[in-house]
Amino acid sequence: MLLALDDYGPPIVNHEKAKQIDAAISTLAQRRTTPEVLEKLRLENKHTCPICLEDFACDEDILTLPCSHHFHATELENWLRRKPRCPVCVSDLPLC
Ligand SMILES: [Zn+2]
Ligand SMILES: [Zn+2]
């Protein structure tokens, strides 16, 4: 990991906003990596997690944002709870 979680910035303290972010996270496409999923990600050149810069491995939970960037699920959740936008293309997480 290049970034410690604390480096993402302070957690969002506004509870209403935090609830909206949690709700938005729960609507994201989550899947478990299989050799087929990894192969597809490799073809799209999206097989590296932009947060920890590690390649995805088998049997990991990954989350996909509406901008179709993929991340390790727990890392993305921690990120979004601090900054509700994509770490790669900076599109805002659509809040309900
Ligand atoms: Zn990662
Ligand atoms: Zn993105």
Image (cartoon, rainbow, N blue to C red):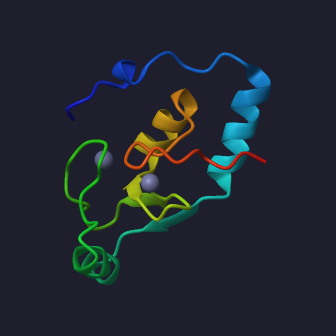
Looking at the rendered structure, the number of numbered marks drawn on it comes to 0
Q: Position of residue 66 (x, y in %)?
A: 56, 61
Q: Is residue 76 left or right of residue 59?
A: right
Q: Position of residue 75 (x, y in %)?
A: 40, 41
Q: Is residue 38 left or right of residue 14?
A: left
The quadrant of the picture occupied by the N terminus is top left
Is residue 18 shown above or below 26?
above
Residue at left 75%, top 22%? 15
Quarter of the rendered image showing ligand 2: bottom left
Is residue 65 shown above or below 7?
below
Q: Position of residue 73 (x, y in %)?
A: 45, 50
Q: Is residue 58 left or right of residue 15?
A: left
Residue at left 20%, top 32%? 2
Residue at left 67%, top 50%? 94
Is residue 2 shown above or below 9?
below
Residue at left 67%, top 58%? 27
| Residue nearest the viewer, comparing 92 with 16 | 92
Q: Position of residue 93 (x, y in %)?
A: 60, 47
